[in-house]
Image: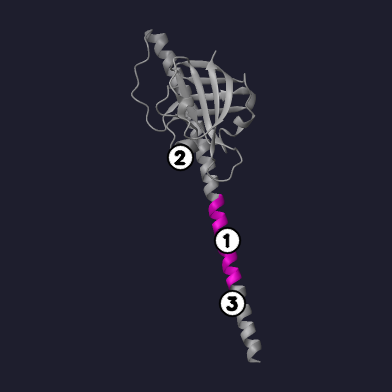
Amino acid sequence: MIRGTESERLARRSRVLLRWMQALLFIVGTLAIGYVAIVLLDARLSQQTANSDLDAQIVADDASHETQNEASPVRGPAKEGDVLGRIEIPRLGLMVAILEGTTSRTLRRGVGHIGGTALPGVAGNIGVAGHRDTYFRSLKDIHASDEILVQTEAGLSHYQVDWVRIVDPEDTGVLASSNDSALTLVTCYPFYYVGPAPKRFIVHARKV
């Protein structure tokens, strides 16, 4: 009788513990889904805002030239998260705003201009980084000769992919300054690697 009672108590405790674990897992899962939803919504709204800001800059720049026949006033240095332009790869269906900087917050909201490289719309080697599991996921299907468009308030630039490489993270030579107008896209590799990826996937294009 005593053994039976002890067994029943253990069984009840096990059932209570199981219910608590189920409730905890449900709460954790709900919070995780909610966090992902918030991040995705923030990224989408940020892209809409960035594209609207860029379009407004283009209109304002055109109006300035038409009414004053003068160059646009010189802007101050770009701050982290500022909208610099928009990149589009028509064959891949990729279109995303280029923001200044490469902090985690910036790269959640768009692709980021790499500090120390030429600014979009300026001659030189423009470096742009993006996450392999979001905006730059489609780069896995890019081909040589693919067209890349970069829109800034100064105008639309056309680039053509001339090579793709996989390099070590320490290989920063791909971002070296250049007298030629070039565009270098950087993301992590392999694309489906779990955790911090060990390599970098580089797409290099020249202005045409």
* Residue 117 location (% of width, % of height): 42, 24
- Point out the tag, 1 or 2, that comes first from the N-terminus: 1
Q: Is residue 128 magenta?
A: no
Observer-side mark, 2 or 3, equals: 2
Q: Amino acid at mark 3?
A: Arg
As measured in the structure, the alpha-carbon distance from the residue carrying label 2 to the one carrying label 3 is 44 Å
Q: Is residue 20 magenta?
A: yes
Dominant secondary-structure state across the stretch colored magenta: helix
Residue 175: give x, y in percent of width and height. Answer: 46, 25
> Residue 85: x, y in percent?
47, 24
Question: Which is in the foreground here, disc 1 or disc 2?
Answer: 2
Q: Which residue is the site of mark 1? A: 25
69 shown above or below 105: above
Q: Amino acid at mark 1?
A: Leu
Q: Secondary structure at mark 3?
A: helix
Q: Rounded to the nearest whole Å, what is the CA distance between mark 1 and mark 3?
A: 18 Å
**Circle count:** 3
User: In the image, what residue occupies the spot 58% across and 66% down?
Assistant: 21
Cα distance between the residues tagged 1 and 2: 28 Å
- What are the residue bounds of the magenta stretch? 17-33
Look at label 2 and name its amino acid: Ser
Number of residues whose C-alpha sits closer than 10 Å to that of mark 3, classed few (under 14), some (14–19) or many (20 or more) = few
Q: Which mark is residue 13?
A: 3
> Depth check: 28 or 92 in front?
92
Say which residue label 2 marks. 104
Find residue 38 and report its horizontal and vertical position in percent: 52, 45
